[in-house]
Image (tube, rainbow, N blue to C red):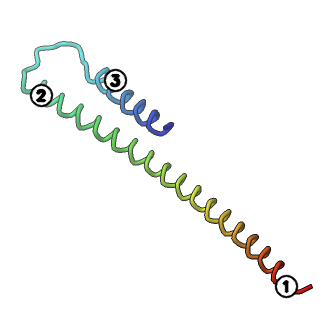
Amino acid sequence: MFKFKFLSAVVLGSVLAGTCLASQPQTDQSAKQDMKDAGHSTKQAAKDTGKATKKTAKTAGHDVKKTTNKAANKTAKETDKGAQKVENKTQPN
């Protein structure tokens, strides 16, 4: 859940920063130049979003791997403990 909130904040921040930086003082620009500027801003926002997504996915993947390893180790430990109990019960005294 935290990663989704972080990703949303990054995307929103990059869009807002892109619009703030993209707005220049009004001069006599043509509609063609305005469209070019809008395209460049959109491209940059998409790049920023892609970088944030990549970083978040990498972190999430690392967390999943770590948790999976912990669960597997704990399961193996408990299995060994159960096997030891069975072995102790079946041995003659």
Q: Residue at x 73, y 73 (%)?
A: 80
Q: Nearer the viewer, mark 1 or mark 3?
A: 1
- Rendered location of residue 51, percent (x, y): 37, 44
Q: Residue at x 31, y 27 (%)?
A: 18
- Rendered location of residue 17, percent (x, y): 35, 25
- Rendered location of residue 55, percent (x, y): 44, 46
Q: Is residue 80 left or right of residue 59?
A: right
Q: Marks 1 and 3, how far apart in space?
A: 72 Å
Quick one: quadrant of the C terminus? bottom right
Q: Residue at x 67, y 69 (%)?
A: 76
Q: Which residue is mark 3?
A: 16
* Residue type pointed to by label 2: Met
Element carrying mark 1: loop
* Residue type pointed to by label 1: Gln
Q: Which residue is mark 1?
A: 91
Label 1, residues with CA under 10 Å away: few <14, some 14-19, many ≥20:
few
Residues marked 1 and 2 touching at CB (< 8 Å) = no
Label 2, residues with CA under 10 Å away: few <14, some 14-19, many ≥20:
few
- Rendered location of residue 62, percent (x, y): 52, 54
Q: Is residue 54 left or right of residue 61?
A: left
Q: Is residue 83 left or right of residue 25?
A: right
